[in-house]
């Protein structure tokens, strides 16, 4: 019996993994070979998807990107014993892309069967929760605070402080909410962990619930991720069967339930207060803060709301201790960041590394430059609300504060690479258009400002009063930045201002055709 | 090439609307905290869209005004107020896909079908919607056809989908 791994990851499936798995099973049967095909998460080397891994005595040997038409030749080449083939990438763990990483949050992703509780346990799973039960809720909160973990959703708020605020609220109904509304273009880390290691997220929620005194957890997942919904729901059921969810978990006396909820295509619901409104069954309108969700959250109760990656990192922090995590990284950016390399890039994928690595190294050395083969012109870091960073700033280290100092942000760690054919004035216009489409409509700077922004950029692109309109656009950006209620309107100016600052020539081309 | 063996979402719009069936669906979710979103998803799955009559039933069951319920349905891009195409193609037009030329490619496809974003072909076969990120950004441009993810979409694949939808 040979064990094979073919990812169930949505990106792998988008490149034909389901069809490949069926073809491999069929071919094996025809040749009288007994194989076990495990549908794992992705290793993150997305340009190699679908990647087949074969378990051999020397380690797991990878073949990718594999297509159905390659299946017969793979068998002919003896791939079940790790045989030589054009697609053979060698031992996956020895691949330079894997060797250069420091996998903390993603240590199990792609390695284990995501829906096997015994495999999760064999890979240090539930050790963090077990330790949490030993040291007690208060010590858990202290440990999380000491680790220096900051929210991975984008804002980078210290996770421990959030937890302490909720823990300090008087006992009663409290909630744990996970924000899995990963809407930023260029990001897919939440998706990958929920498909590849869903039990780590469930364990993180359990630890959080135990620490703050909550018995119910919700995951708000975007509807654009149908495969996550299936995998994660199955993971909840597996955890329940194994006694890691429900009443009196493993004899601890602690009760906890997890429920998966699906969004409905509103980007703004990634904003935490809007997400809470949506969970309550209302329009996803942003709430004014204060009160903070930690005091008045879901259904008015104290609520911890964390991003998927923050929550999925908790088990490791609890297992290995705060110091282990805090020793990684630079300055006030502690630990690791799962970077997502995307867009027009040769080697796209998920690369988890300590904070501090220069942006240019990520784009050119790890990402291998553009897929088109043309020069890199800009990288948008941190999603649709993140700045466009020019090549001249490529020595900038991946670090919250270093990026902030250059009017940029790391956000959720997505990098979208553009080659020299990009029209930055068009991208600025798109930034405003996106904000207009997705604005919840509560505050005027965002609701109206974004539409006025589109109109003003159209005028500039058409060569109308360019100087005056650029001034007007800058003024509008300022108003949106400081007058908006949440990060949608408040950060939408970042891509626009950065395009104006670093690529002014694109706004002064001879009159262009109106909207492509 | 596309991944034809992937399990597709069930064809929507199969069931004829009835107040009774809507009430059953609503009742099945009333034990949940904040049941509105799960109900709306279930209604759309059953009927292919969220009929006005169902909105009225929901408002009554949830004890909120019809105006408020209407506000919820119309806030979210996913919920349709009228029957939709038999098949749905969501094409990503977010930044990552744009870096690989998605905008021009989608425009050409829409022009060929004489549709705008959100439009449905006159035979009711295919609705084409814009989507802002499918998390397939290392395989841009990407799309989602009846729930099936597709990476590295090109013009030929889009044409194939349009032809298949009309079969």
Image (cartoon, rainbow, N blue to C red):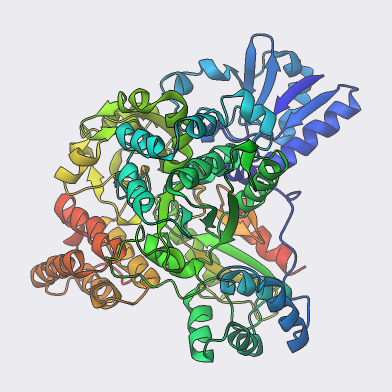
Where does the image place residue A12, in percent across and percent down from the top left?
Answer: 61, 40
- For the N terminus of chain A, which image quadrant? top right
Percent x, y for residue B89? 61, 64
In the picture provided, is A153 more to the left or to the right than B63? left
Q: Nearer the viewer, residue A134 or B15?
A: A134
Quick check: can you spot residue A192?
A: no
Task: Say which of A487 and A129 sits in front.
Answer: A129
Residue A397 in percent (x, y) is at 23, 32
Q: Is residue A512 above or below residue B50?
A: above
Q: In the displayed structure, would residue A128 be above or below residue B110?
A: above
Please report the residue visible at 55 percent of the width from the left and 47 percent of the height from the top.
B152
User: Left or right of A135: which side holds A460?
Assistant: left
Which quarter of the figure is the C terminus of chain A placed in?
Answer: bottom left
Q: Where is A287 relative to A138, above or below?
A: below
Residue at 71 percent across and 77 percent down: it is B27
Image quadrant in which you'd find residue A244:
top right
Residue drawn at (51%, 27%) of the image: A107
Image position of A266 (left or right of A393): right
As rendered, which of A130 and A252 lies closer to the eye? A252
Rendered position, A459 above or below B8: below
């Amino acid at each position: 019996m040979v064990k094979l791994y073919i990812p169930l990851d949505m990106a792998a499936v988008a490149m034909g993994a389901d069809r490949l798995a069926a073809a491999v099973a069929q071919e094996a049967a025809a040749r009288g070979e007994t194989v076990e095909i495990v549908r794992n998460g992705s290793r993150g080397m997305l340009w190699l998807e679908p990647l087949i891994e074969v378990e051999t005595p020397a380690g797991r040997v990878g073949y990718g990107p594999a297509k159905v038409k390659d299946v017969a030749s793979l068998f002919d080449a003896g791939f079940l014993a790790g045989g030589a083939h054009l697609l053979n990438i060698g031992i996956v763990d020895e691949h330079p892309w894997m060797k250069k990483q420091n996998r903390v949050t993603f240590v199990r992703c792609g390695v284990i069967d995501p829906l096997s509780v015994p495999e999760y346990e064999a890979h240090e799973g539930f050790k963090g929760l077990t330790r949490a039960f030993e040291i007690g809720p208060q010590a858990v909160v202290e440990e999380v605070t000491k680790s220096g973990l900051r929210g991975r959703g984008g804002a980078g708020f210290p996770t421990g402080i959030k937890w302490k605020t909720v823990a300090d609220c008087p006992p009663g109904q409290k909630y744990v909410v996970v924000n899995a509304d990963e809407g930023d273009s260029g990001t897919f880390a939440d998706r990958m962990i929920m498909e590849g290691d869903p039990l780590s997220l469930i364990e993180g929620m359990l630890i959080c619930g135990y620490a703050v005194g909550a018995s119910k957890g919700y995951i708000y997942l975007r509807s654009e991720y149908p495969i996550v919904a299936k995998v994660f729901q199955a993971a909840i059921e597996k955890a329940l069967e194994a006694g890691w969810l429900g009443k009196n978990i493993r004899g601890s006396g602690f009760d906890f339930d997890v429920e998966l909820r699906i969004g409905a295509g509103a980007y703004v619901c990634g904003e935490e207060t809007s997400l809470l409104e949506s969970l309550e069954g209302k329009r996803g309108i942003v709430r004014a803060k204060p009160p903070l969700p930690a005091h008045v959250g879901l259904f008015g109760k104290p609520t911890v709301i964390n991003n998927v990656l923050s929550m999925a990192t908790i088990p490791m922090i609890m297992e290995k201790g705060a110091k282990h995590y805090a020793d990684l990284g630079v300055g006030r950016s502690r630990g690791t960041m799962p970077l997502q390399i995307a867009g027009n890039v040769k080697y796209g994928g998920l690369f988890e590394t300590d904070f501090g690595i220069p942006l240019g190294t990520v784009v050119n050395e790890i990402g291998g430059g553009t897929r088109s083969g043309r020069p890199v012109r800009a990288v948008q870091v941190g999603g649709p609300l993140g700045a466009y960073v020019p090549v001249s700033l490529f020595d900038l280290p991946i670090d919250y504060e270093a990026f902030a100092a250059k009017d940029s942000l790391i956000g959720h760690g997505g990098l979208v690479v553009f080659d020299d054919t990009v029209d930055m004035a068009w991208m600025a216009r798109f930034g405003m258009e996106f904000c207009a489409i997705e604005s919840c409509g509560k505050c005027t700077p965002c609701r109206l400002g974004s539409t006025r922004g589109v109109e003003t950029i159209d005028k500039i692109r058409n060569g109308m009063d360019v100087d005056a309109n650029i001034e007007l656009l800058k003024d509008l950006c300022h108003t949106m930045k400081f007058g908006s209620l949440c990060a949608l309107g408040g950060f939408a100016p970042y891509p626009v201002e950065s395009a104006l600052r670093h690529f002014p020539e694109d706004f002064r081309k001879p009159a262009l055709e109106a909207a492509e | 090439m596309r991944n034809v063996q992937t399990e597709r979402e069930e064809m929507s719009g199969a069931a004829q609307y009835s107040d009774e069936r809507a009430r059953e669906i609503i009742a099945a979710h009333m034990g949940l905290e904040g049941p509105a979103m799960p109900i709306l998803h279930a209604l759309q799955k059953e009927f292919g869209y969220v009929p006005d009559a169902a909105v009225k039933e929901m408002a009554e069951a949830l004890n909120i005004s019809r105006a408020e319920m209407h506000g919820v349905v119309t806030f979210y891009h996913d919920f349709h107020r009228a029957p939709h195409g038999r098949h749905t193609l969501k094409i990503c037009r977010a930044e990552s896909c744009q870096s690989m030329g998605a905008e021009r490619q989608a425009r050409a496809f829409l022009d060929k079908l004489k549709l705008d974003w959100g439009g449905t072909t006159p035979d009711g076969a295919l609705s084409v919607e814009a989507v802002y990120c499918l998390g397939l950004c290392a395989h841009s441009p990407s799309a989602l056809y009846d729930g099936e993810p597709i990476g590295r979409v090109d013009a030929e694949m889009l044409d194939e989908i349009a032809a298949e939808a009309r079969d």
